[in-house]
Image (cartoon, grey):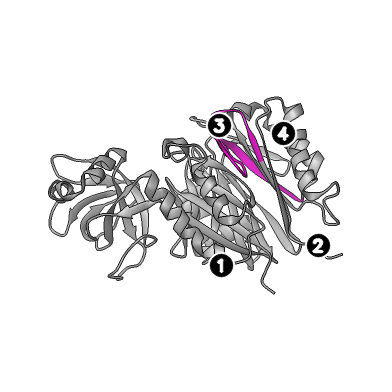
Amino acid sequence: MTQEMRFASGTTTEEAVERAVPDLLGQVQAQLGDQPGPGGIDLALVFISSPLTHAVPEIAQRLRDGLNPKALLGCTAEGVIGREREIEEDPAITLVAAQLPGVTLTPIHLQPGENDWHKLLLGQEEFQRLVNAPPEARLFILLGDPFSAPMDDVLVSFNACYPGVPVIGGMASGALRPLGNTLLLDDRLTQEGAVGLALSGALDVDVIVSQGCRPIWRPFNVGAAHRNVILNLEGRPPLAWLQDLIPELPEEDRLLLGNGLFVGRSIKPGQEALGRGDFLIRGVVGIDQRSGAIAIGDSVIEGETIQFHLRDALTAQEDLEMMLIPQMFRDPPRGGLLFSCNGRGTRLYDHPNGDIAVIQRSLENIHLAGFFCAGEIGPVGGANFLHGHTASLVLFRPPAV
């Protein structure tokens, strides 16, 4: 009998590991049947909320014993996302298990010492040697520790060494201090660096990165910049433009400025008509009242195009819905993974399950798991970036016949 791509998922809020893991395994087995099939479980991903960080070694061991997956990947998180709900405060574990016939899973450990990151990222040969991914890789799943992994630089290396291959994932959010997060890959646990998998072979993937912003005013050309500071926009300090333009905003948009102002960096140089999906969104992190300069959460270069953006719950929901529309014209995906910013959830929406409810309405209640990240990883415009405030989603299907 030919095995098919299948996914199963489970979520538990049991605090005791001896009850939580059997609960998860029971949910997965009920979906797959008593016997997972001739190929067993190929891939299992588990996300564990921070109150259960102390129990990660036991949880991982029990999952390996119960599922015997070819690859087990996961991390601790501030909150986790299950198939039907987002759990932001309570102890919880969410799990997705998959049978992926014809798919090769290659483990990735990026954990050099503090002084070796520069060496790793400097040369493509060294990076490719450590990643050890097959040249036909279709997708990378990457989980990192925000205190020790220079993820922006890591993604630059992925873009250079594996052009056009999407990287999806997020930064562990289970701790507010170094060495507080736990990353797991198979039988290995670590508090630093990054872990992941390269997927190659018989699969089709779609990656959706919903930044949930809308542009306001018009695009501007950066006249002068230094690192992450914009000094001049078309002959004037950015603050001078803002002081002139803010009064032109509708009242509701002026109120949204209380949620923060964002800058979109155009990812399509030279394109005149820009809209949603054409920008890499970064937050405004500071304003110099004397010089009128503004600082954003990214480097800026002279000559690039930027546009100011606003974010609110309605925009975030509409943006995600819009990006999911093309999926409705295809066969339903078999499963997925969701990496949402820890600034979303009930910090963005006035109701629970904001992102997962939109996804399940659009995708016929697929099996998935995810977590609230301290930075989300996903591609925009063909290159991979570390984001904030996004919902990054990967959907899995068997290859088209």
Label 2 with label 3: CB-CB less than 8 Å: no
Measured Cα–Cα span from mark 1 to mark 4: 39 Å
Q: Nearer the viewer, mark 2 or mark 3?
A: 2
Q: Amino acid at mark 3?
A: Leu
Pointer 3: residues within 10 angstroms few (<14), some, or many (20+)? Answer: some
Measured Cα–Cα span from mark 3 to mark 1: 44 Å
Does 104 appear in magenta? no
User: Residue at position x 28%, y 62% from top?
Assistant: 304
Q: Is residue 290 above or below residue 323?
A: above
First in sequence, mark 1 or 4: give its number.
4
First in sequence, mark 4 or 2: give its number.
2
Per the image, the residue denoted by label 1 is: 329
User: Which secondary structure lies at badge 1?
Assistant: helix
Per the image, the residue denoted by label 4 is: 59
User: Which secondary structure lies at badge 2?
Assistant: loop
The magenta segment = 70-94
The quadrant holding residue 165 is bottom right
Per the image, the residue denoted by label 3 is: 179
First in sequence, mark 3 or 1: give its number.
3
Label 4 with label 3: CB-CB less than 8 Å: no
Measured Cα–Cα span from mark 2 to mark 3: 41 Å
Per the image, the residue denoted by label 2 is: 3
